[in-house]
Image (cartoon, rainbow, N blue to C red):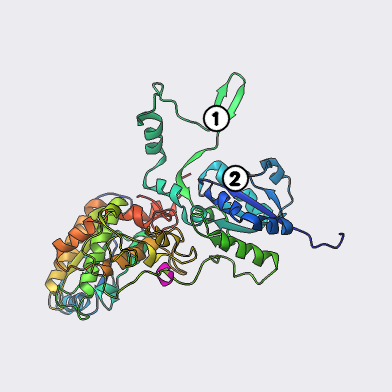
């Protein structure tokens, strides 16, 4: 399904979204029951806490063909497990620096704090990220990882 | 004399390597006599004068154990890896380079063109007005000269051939090699194919004698010269980035015993595909700071995350190379 046409209007990026159970996942439920329309680009993976998201998950997703990764957690101070989202923020900041060194466009990796009541924010974030990635075009990462150049 | 057990046939070969792994084999010191009593060395370019054609002339599976050290960087490395695979019963990826790419694997941060440009055009000590570059073939009046092809990507041994065992380290600790060798000689039950051998099932920190506390509370990492090491507190807690938390034990924590931080040559724990990811995860848990600017400052002090966390493992990591 991977499109190779840049800026293709009809191409929908594949965004792997890691949402924490207590805030952002609930927000996406809220967006659903509120019938908010947003781009059908995310594949949501529910994790118990954004602090559970290992950098390995992000790399694995990129290596398997994700065009972008969206991480959603509770606002600072609101973590169900007190400090998980701070750990997520530190990991994410380090991961961003690594991703930059590895030549991954920074728009492809995004962290947002979205509380359970912010269905609207979820809609906006997903739409905005989808648009940004559509401008970048499909990710080359999977291809580079899988093709060894001799 | 006649009913002596046939001796094992042993080969050691280097791909893209520094030679340190071959020297680590010599570091068995007087145990070399035990090795030679039990094994014939049939191929070892650094020490003995055998030719590639001698290996080619061997029947398949003629060699009992081959220690292949070094990454795969050129067509010659690849050819020899395939040849030795065919001629060996057991092929061991010996050392960090064969295991996960090692130091030569850091070239995956760049590519062949940029490397050649730097080395043959730009470097301060190079004078090359005709922009001559090495090519696999060149015609001179005496005939055709050939060189192995230099690949764009550095590969681990298992990206080229099927590998039976991995024995990591830069270089592997010689005691571990002797243990493995003796296991083969005595016909002990060998671990399942694909195992990492000559290692412990615990991380470096478990063997490290330095004092560790539960809360690390690191505000920023420092360069080694900025810290006066007290000799007993965990290096990470003192702000010196140590790869111990994400690195498998086996070496006997030699670097930290020598007051230098672990650099991660023994690779990740069992079942972990990416040592750098685990180190990033660990570091983030060790830092304090909750505000973005505090965190930015702390992360800024990790000068080169990719190069530090993947010093020995870039080609073997999930992303494998710079995109």
Tags 2 and 1 touching, CB below 8 Å? no
Q: Specify the principal SS of the magenta part.
A: helix
Residue that badge 1 annotates: B137
Which residue sits furthest top? Answer: B141
Q: Residues within 10 Å of mark 1 (few under 14, many from 20)?
A: few
Residue that badge 2 annotates: B79
Q: Nearer the viewer, residue B69 or A35?
A: B69
Residue at (49% x, 65% y) in the render = B250
On the same chain, marks 2 and 1? The answer is yes
The answer to which quarter of the image holds residue B314 is bottom left
Whether residue A12 can be seen here: no
Q: Is residue B199 left or right of residue A36?
A: right
Image: magenta residue range? B203-207
Q: Is residue B96 left or right of residue B28?
A: left
Q: Chain of mark 2?
A: B
Q: Nearer the viewer, residue A62 or B241?
A: B241
Q: Nearer the viewer, residue A118 or B295?
A: B295
Which residue sits furthest right? Answer: B2
The answer to which quarter of the image holds residue B189 is bottom right
Residue at (44% x, 70% y) in the render = B207
Q: Quadrant of the N terminus of chain A?
A: bottom left
Q: Is residue A101 above or below residue A39?
A: above
Q: Nearer the viewer, residue B70 or A89?
A: B70
Name the spot of residue B114 as percent of width and height, x first.
Answer: 37, 38
Whether residue A48 can be seen here: yes
């Amino acid at each position: 399904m991977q499109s190779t046409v840049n800026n293709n209007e009809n191409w929908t990026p594949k965004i792997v979204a890691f949402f924490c159970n207590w805030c952002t996942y609930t927000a996406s439920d809220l967006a659903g029951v509120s019938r908010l329309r947003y781009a059908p680009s995310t594949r949501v993976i529910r994790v118990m806490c954004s602090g559970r998201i290992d950098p390995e998950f992000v790399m694995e997703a990129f290596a398997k063909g994700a065009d972008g990764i969206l991480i959603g957690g509770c606002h600072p101070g609101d973590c169900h497990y007190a400090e998980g989202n701070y750990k997520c923020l530190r990991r994410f900041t380090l991961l961003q620096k690594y991703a930059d060194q590895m030549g991954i466009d920074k728009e492809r990796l995004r962290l947002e704090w979205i509380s359970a009541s912010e269905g609207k924010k979820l809609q906006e974030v997903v739409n905005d990220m989808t648009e940004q990635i559509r401008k970048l075009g499909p990710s080359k990462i999977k291809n580079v990882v899988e093709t060894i150049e001799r | 004399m006649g009913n002596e057990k046939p001796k094992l046939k042993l080969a050691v070969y280097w791909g893209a390597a520094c030679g340190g792994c071959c020297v680590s084999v010599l570091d068995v010191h007087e145990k070399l006599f035990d090795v030679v009593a039990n094994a014939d060395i049939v191929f070892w370019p650094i020490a003995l004068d055998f030719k590639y054609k001698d290996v080619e002339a061997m029947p398949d599976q003629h060699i009992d154990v081959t220690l292949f050290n070094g990454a795969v960087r050129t067509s010659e490395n690849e050819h020899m890896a395939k040849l030795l695979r065919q001629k060996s019963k057991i092929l061991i990826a010996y050392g960090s380079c064969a295991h996960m790419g090692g130091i030569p694997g850091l070239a995956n941060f760049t590519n062949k063109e940029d490397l050649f440009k730097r080395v043959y055009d730009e470097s301060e000590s190079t004078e090359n007005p005709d922009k001559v570059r090495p090519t696999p073939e060149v015609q001179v009046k005496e005939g055709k000269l050939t060189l192995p092809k230099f690949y764009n990507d550095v590969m681990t041994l298992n990206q080229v051939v099927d590998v039976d065992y991995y024995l990591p380290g830069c270089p592997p600790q010689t005691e571990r090699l002797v243990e493995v060798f003796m296991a083969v000689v005595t016909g002990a039950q060998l671990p399942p194919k694909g195992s990492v051998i000559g290692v412990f099932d615990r991380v470096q920190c478990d063997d490290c004698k330095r004092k560790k506390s539960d809360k690390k509370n690191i505000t920023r990492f420092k360069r080694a010269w900025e810290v006066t090491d007290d000799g007993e507190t965990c290096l990470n807690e003192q702000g010196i980035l140590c790869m111990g938390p994400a690195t498998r034990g086996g070496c006997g924590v030699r670097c930290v015993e020598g007051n230098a931080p672990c650099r991660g040559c023994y690779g990740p724990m069992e079942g972990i595909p990416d040592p750098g990811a685990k180190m990033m995860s660990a570091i983030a848990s060790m830092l304090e700071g909750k505000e973005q600017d505090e965190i930015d400052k702390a992360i800024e002090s990790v000068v080169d995350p990719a190069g530090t966390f993947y010093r020995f493992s870039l080609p073997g990591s999930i992303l494998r190379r710079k995109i």
